[in-house]
């Protein structure tokens, strides 16, 4: 019988501590890692750093997924084009729509491909938002092709992380002595 049927309430059970949690180390809060942390990449997290945690599987999945998205997008555009043909809007409108999607896709491909190697300007990014939305097939194609080589944006994130790690190392290494106490050579 359930609690509703009997009219009684179940007594709350005390939470059981996981096995081995009686040690002081298990009860302490995690420590803050030393040094810079890698920036996570969409679908990859921080597995791009050491290529661990099913990195290869994730790359294959992202490649297949983005290729499937490109195929589905092309199918949708094909249906839209057939809709224009059925509506008998004329050759000029049909050609204009095809050229518009082709040009926007090419520009979106170039912009997306470039954003994998350098940080895009936020002002320019907001200006191009409409163009990138129209040329979504180009962005998806760039994502697919880049995922064949590496996690999209991995080289940019790796370069940024290595620069931050190098700066951190230089800041935290101890000097070998007080330069003011050095004796003059001579």
Image: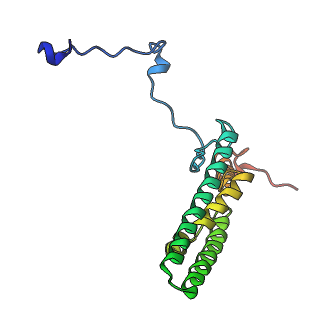
Can you see residue 155? no
Q: Residue at x 46, y 17 (%)?
A: 24
Asked where in the image residue 176 lies, by quadrant, the reply is top right
Is 163 on the left or on the right of 22, as rendered?
Answer: right
Q: Residue at x 67, y 39 (%)?
A: 57
Can you see residue 22? yes
Q: Nearer the viewer, residue 138 or 117?
A: 138
Q: Nearer the viewer, residue 91 or 74?
A: 91
| Residue located farthest toward the bottom when viewing the structure as drawn | 92
Q: How is the image coloured?
A: rainbow
Q: Nearer the viewer, residue 76 or 63?
A: 76
Q: Position of residue 128 (x, y in %)?
A: 53, 75
Q: Position of residue 173 (x, y in %)?
A: 68, 44
Q: Residue at x 11, y 15 (%)?
A: 7
* 92 in relation to 53, above or below: below
Q: For the C terminus, which image quadrant?
A: bottom right
Q: Position of residue 69 (x, y in %)?
A: 59, 56
Q: Residue at x 20, y 11 (%)?
A: 1
* 111 in relation to 116, above or below: below
Asked where in the image residue 12 lies, by quadrant, the reply is top left
Q: Position of residue 149 (x, y in %)?
A: 75, 53
Q: Nearer the viewer, residue 43 or 67?
A: 67
| Residue located farthest toward the left when viewing the structure as drawn | 7
Mark count: 0
């Amino acid at each position: 019988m359930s609690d509703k049927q009997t009219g009684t309430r179940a007594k709350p059970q005390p939470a059981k501590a996981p096995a081995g949690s009686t040690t002081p180390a298990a009860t302490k809060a995690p420590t803050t890692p030393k040094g810079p942390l890698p920036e996570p990449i969409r679908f990859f997290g921080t597995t791009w750093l050491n290529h661990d945690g099913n990195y290869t599987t994730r790359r294959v999945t992202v490649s297949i997924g983005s290729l499937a998205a490109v195929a589905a997008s092309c199918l949708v555009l094909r249906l839209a084009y057939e809709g224009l043909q059925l509506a008998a809007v004329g050759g000029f409108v049909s050609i204009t729509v095809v050229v518009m999607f082709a040009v926007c896709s090419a520009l979106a491909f170039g912009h997306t491909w470039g954003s994998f190697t350098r940080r895009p300007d936020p002002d320019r990014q907001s200006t191009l938002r409409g163009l990138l939305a129209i040329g979504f097939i180009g962005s998806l194609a760039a994502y697919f092709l880049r995922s064949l080589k590496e996690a999209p944006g991995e080289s940019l994130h790796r370069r940024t992380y290595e620069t931050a790690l190098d700066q951190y190392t230089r800041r935290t290494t101890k000097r070998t002595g007080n330069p003011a106490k050095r004796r003059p050579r001579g």
